[in-house]
Image (spheres, rainbow, N blue to C red):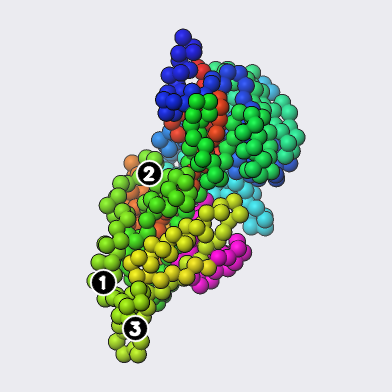
Amino acid sequence: MKKLLCILLCLMLVPLYATAENVEDSLIVGMLSTRTTELTPLFPKERDIVSLYSLMYESLVTIDDNGIPQPLLAESWSETGDGKTWTFTLRENITFSDGTPLTARDVAASGNKILSVAKDEQAEDNGFYANIRYLVNSFTARDDRTVEVKAARPYYGLLYSMTFPVVPESQVEYANPVGTGPYVVSGFEACSFLLLSVNENWWQMTPQVREITVMFYPNNKDMITAYEYGRVDTVFTRSVAAAQYKSGLTSLSIAYSTRQLEMVMLNHRERSFPLDNVNVRRAIRYAINVDSIAKNAYMGMTVKADACYPTDSWLYLDQENQFVYNPDKAREILAAEGWSDLDNNGILDLPVEGAPEPKHLVLSLYVYEDPENDVRYETANMIADDLKKVGISVHVETVDYAGALEVLKAGSFDMFLCAFQIDVVPDLGFILRKGNSQNYGRYASTPMTDLIDELRISEDQAGFAYASQAIQQQFAADVPFISLFYRAGAILTRKMFTTVRSIREFELLRGIEAFGR
């Protein structure tokens, strides 16, 4: 019966020909790590390490398969007064792995420690959870089971920020604190290995997988080689090279979503001809074959995101007709705006009254070539080729990271192919709201700013969803930039260890604690 159940669970997740074996009671994982010298869950230094911390430490709130906040350490919550006070009630009888009872003081101390670093203007790094400073003013323990959170404003999005790890009050300043999660550390050597074993004091059912061995590698090549030679059971990678590994008879390739949004930033600065014209921006959107870029440059390792929200989000609004690849439509729009090829050189021109020469539709496209993302230059050239087909000439220019920041901050570009890491709180205001520091395109829309402000005072789930979808409609109308897609990664594994529907970045072993139940 157990074997049959395992087979059925596998079929739920992978094609019929994939028959990876049951993980049974142990798993060996390969992971990239070069900077984690000690275990500091409140202030992680590397993105994949966060997935390990989520097995050892739990939070007040968890995010379900649909992307909606659900209770975890908190059994319930409520908001009172003007929406600026949230009260979280902890579950009873939860202990840390050393047997010490969890109390509201531990939650408050963990939250306030993160908050203090996040608000420290002198700190070189405000921490992985730094955005909490925009949402929370303070945490207070009212009694052993009641945590009061003073919010910066009434905002449903605050619940997403309650996903930080909770450690004992007495250990917030120390490395390797105990946690309430399903696993505990039984061995660790920086940049070498981490051994996890079952937390016998965990408040839920004992996991089937009792031991997890994590081997750390300095680069993708060494990690993938270890997988190919069977030295590890599972690896996580964001390299597009992982696309060559397909699910087969003894191995699975499971896609996971990241929060890295790839985009073409458009410059809206005053008198930024011709991109100050929304119809030119629309034409550019229609002319870029995003699906082809996703398939051929990124090898399909993407999640579609027409208006910044991924298609697998509960907040996504389907406006596919607004974002389809249609070069004929692009030509039609440009012609209606007066653009034509006056000298038959393949580049569109626009006569300007009183000017001796027409304007030429020639744009610069900067690209930051990330050492960990070697496909952006290829993508930039694909975009240039697409735009050339509708009469737009594009000069591609590459810059390093420092040069990219300089160009973006100065606004000295027409288009910029870049990426942003989106916070756990699904709020795009930092790049869409007028005047925000990372709105490098100088996009300024009063209707969009009003919608962002409406989102940020939405106190319930329905209001939050309504404002999010209105933002997507305004995005389609204004074309502030070209939203390409979210990057995806791949989990390569010979052993089935989870049955959850949605595996995502920072929770790459999500569901392992419940496998086999």
Disc marking residue 358: 3
**Element assignment for label 3:** loop
Q: Nearer the viewer, residue 184 or 187?
A: 187
Q: Is residue 212 magenta?
A: no
Q: Nearer the viewer, mark 2 or mark 1?
A: 1
Please report the residue visible at 46 percent of the width from the left and 18 percent of the height from the top.
7
**Element assignment for label 1:** helix
Confirm or deny contact between disc 2 and disc 1 (CB under 8 A).
no
Q: Amino acid at mark 3?
A: Pro
Spatial CA distance of label 3 from label 2 is 42 Å
Badge 1 crowding class, 10 Å Cα cut-off, few under 14, some 14 to 19, many 20 or more, is: some
Please report the residue visible at 48 percent of the width from the left and 37 percent of the height from the top.
255
**Element assignment for label 2:** loop
What segment is highlighted magenta in the picture?
A: 398-426
Q: Against 496, is 450 above or below?
A: below
Residue that carries the numbered disc 2 in the rendered image: 311
